[in-house]
Image (cartoon, rainbow, N blue to C red):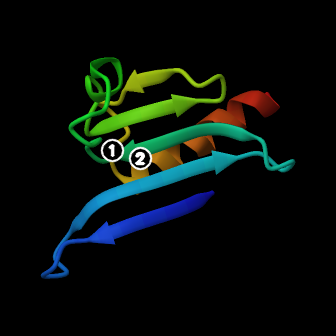
Amino acid sequence: MYCVEEIDRNGGFIELYWYDWYDDQKELIMKFHAHYHPDETPANITMYDPFHIHTANERRLNNEKFQELYMILEFIRLRNISIKL
């Protein structure tokens, strides 16, 4: 997992983040992002702002459920358990 967080000026909360999940071979599995894209970004990208997921095949998805690191890590944990069953 590669994590980048930007904290607000007062240090009170995470303003935006990038949590990028990779496998053991460093191949991308998913990216969980929370940020707004610049104004000149195409609408088919900004429609998912601020919470969105990038898949390994470069699809973008709206992310209404996994918006906090704890929930993202829980999703990863359950996915890994299900693969091993």
Quick check: marks 2 and 1 in contact, CB under 8 Å? yes
- On screen, residue 4 above or below 43: below
**Quadrant in the picture for residue 46:** top left
Residue most toward the left?
10
Q: Position of residue 7 (x, y in %)?
A: 27, 72
- Quarter of the figure that contains the C terminus: top right
Residue found 26% across the figure and 23% down from its top: 47
What amino acid type is highlighted by mark number 2? Answer: Met
Answer few, some or many: residues within 10 Å of disc 1's Cα (few below 14, many 20 plus, some between 14 and 19): some
Q: Position of residue 65 (x, y in %)?
A: 33, 33
**Quadrant in the picture for residue 41:** top left
Judge left or right: residue 51 versus residue 77.
left
Q: Position of residue 23 (x, y in %)?
A: 77, 45
**Quadrant in the picture for residue 66:** top left
Q: CA distance from mark 2 to mark 1?
A: 7 Å
Q: Position of residue 32 (x, y in %)?
A: 46, 42
What amino acid type is highlighted by mark number 1? Answer: Gln
- Quarter of the figure that contains the N terminus: bottom right
Label tally = 2
Q: Which residue is mark 1?
A: 67
Foreground residue among 44 and 39: 39
Query: In what element is the residue under mark 1?
Result: loop
Residue found 61% across the figure and 45% down from its top: 77
Residue 71, disc: 2
Judge left or right: residue 24 versus residue 71.
right
Judge left or right: residue 71 versus residue 26.
left
